[in-house]
Amino acid sequence: MKRRRPRTRSGLGAVIAAAAVGLAGALWTWTEPGDRALWTAASDAPGVELHLLDNGFHTDLAVPRAALEARGGPLAEAVRSLPTGDWILIGWGDAKFYVEQSPIGDRLPDGARAFFRPGNPSVIMLDPARRDPTELFAEDGRRSFRVTPAGFESLTAHVEASLDLSTGAPRIAAARAGDDARFFASRETFSIAHLCNHWTAGVLNAAGLPVRPFRSVVSSELMAAIDRAELDRAPSGA
């Protein structure tokens, strides 16, 4: 009597592997579409100048203080509580790791906690800057752009929606001695699935910028997204 050969699973394994590669490729190239009507403000039309600042791994947005305060609402209320400065640097991150400034080597265990434990509390940084962003960051670490008034409203509404307003008003969760920055409690959570640059990508996308969410884990991707948008705009503005 002949023995039956055991069924091989190599075919199924190959299918699963191919599906995994295909999914990874789709996520890597997936683009969240933008809205050129919001993002692109012509030089001779009303608009708001903004700057994306990149320190090599984290991004902040530099926003004119006057424009934030004129808008009104909880975000404007938070901005009015800050020390003087014509520009407000806006960033987001883990409620502990983002605020701490001790040597990175001493904070590696806490960094692992922030990355791999789900549901970590987060904060929105509002930091008043007295100097112009073009003086704060060299050109290779900065991208300057203009959005339409509607794009600015959408961008700031997205930031404001991230504030924890459970007490009825923005709440300062942390501050640093000798530092004008204030860290306001956010209703969002931080983890490897939702990092600081993912958050900033969402803010920029609200203003009409097409972004690639999966790649936005790194700050350079956000800089590249703005560069691509400027290249797309160039022919129509020529």
Image (cartoon, rainbow, N blue to C red):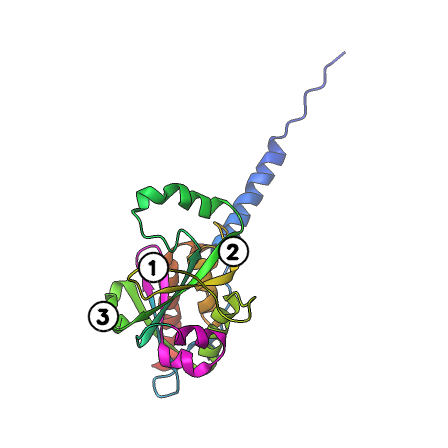
Q: Which residue corresponds to mark 3?
A: 135
Residue 141: give x, y in percent of width and height. Answer: 28, 63
Q: Label 2 amino acid?
A: Thr
Q: Residue visible at 52% across and 69% down?
A: 161
- Indicate the secondary structure of the residue bearing disc 2: strand
Q: Which badge, 3 or 2, comes first in the chain's sequence?
A: 3
Q: Residues within 10 Å of mark 1 (few under 14, many from 20)?
A: few
Kindly check if marks 3 and 2 are in contact, taking CB atoms under 8 A apart as contact. Answer: no
**Element assignment for label 1:** loop
Q: Nearer the viewer, mark 3 or mark 2?
A: 2
- Three-letter code for the amino acid on which mark 3 is drawn: Glu
**What residue did someone put label 1 on?**
176
Q: Is residue 136 visible?
A: yes
Residue 2: which disc?
none
The stretch drawn in magenta includes residue 166: no
Whether pointer 2 and pointer 1 mark residues with C-beta atoms closer than 8 Å, the reply is no
Q: Is residue 175 left or right of residue 34?
A: left
Residue pictured at 43% horizontal, 72% vertical: 78
Q: Which residue is mark 2?
A: 189
Front residue (pair 84, 104): 84
Q: CA distance from mark 3 to mark 1?
A: 23 Å
Q: Nearer the viewer, residue 193 or 237?
A: 193
| Mark nearer the N terminus (2 vs 1) | 1
| The magenta segment | 53-81
